[in-house]
Image (cartoon, rainbow, N blue to C red):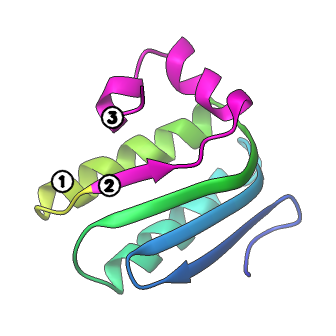
Amino acid sequence: MSGGSIWSMDTAPGLVRLGGEIDYTVTPQVREALLGAVRADAGPVTLDLTDLEYLDSSGLAVFIELRKFLKQQGRGLELTNLQDPVRKVFVLTQVQTLFGIA
């Protein structure tokens, strides 16, 4: 796992697992790590958010940027295993349909 003191990331081909808390203090590092991970691979990407406990609007912006980047390359993005506090951010900001979140 790599990351700062409050977030973590682990990757496998086509899969990125995020954990901990993603807020404005770590979004620059998260953005750099995520974009680096998806550039190193081809095909669709799944973000497994099982261990992600907190996400603020700056973290959400990183996910939107990642989705746009992948879409421009003809690649898909799927978010899985959202915990209730994280899901709530997507619902309150009304971007859940952008990511196919029910």
User: Quadrant of the rendered structure where residue 55 is?
Assistant: top right
| Residue 80 vertical placement versus 60 (above, below) | below
For mark 2, what is the residue? Answer: 77
Query: Where is residue 42 shown, x and y percent of the image?
Result: 24, 81
Residue 61 placement, left or right of 23 = left
User: Quadrant of the rendered structure where residue 74 is?
Assistant: bottom left
Residue type at tag 2: Leu
- Look at the image and give the residue range highlighted in magenta: 77-102
For mark 1, what is the residue? Answer: 71
- Secondary element under disc 2, as helix, strand or loop, is strand
Q: Nearer the viewer, residue 31 or 47?
A: 47
Q: Are marks 1 and 2 in contact (CB under 8 Å)?
A: yes
Question: Residue at the location (74% across, 81% down)?
Answer: 1
Residue type at tag 3: Gly
Residue type at tag 1: Lys
Choose mark 1 or mark 3, whichever is in front. Answer: 3
Q: Compute the Cα span from label 1 to label 3.
A: 14 Å
Assess disc 2: are there few (<14), some (14-19) or many (≥20) residues with their C-alpha within 10 Å of its C-alpha.
many
Question: Residue at the location (60% across, 67% down)?
Answer: 17
Query: Where is residue 22 shown, x and y percent of the image?
Result: 72, 48
Assess disc 1: are there few (<14), some (14-19) or many (≥20) residues with their C-alpha within 10 Å of its C-alpha.
few
Residue 80 placement, left or right of 30 = left
| Residue 19 vertical placement versus 2 (above, below) | above
Residue 52 seen in render: yes
Task: Give the mark nearer the N terminus: 3 vs 2.
Answer: 2
Q: Compute the Cα span from label 3 to label 2.
A: 9 Å
User: Quadrant of the rendered structure where residue 18 is?
Assistant: bottom right
Query: Where is residue 38 shown, x and y percent of the image?
Result: 37, 74
Query: Where is residue 66 shown, x and y percent of the image?
Result: 37, 54
- Secondary element under disc 1, as helix, strand or loop, is helix
| Residue 78 vertical placement versus 64 (above, below) | below
For mark 3, what is the residue? Answer: 100
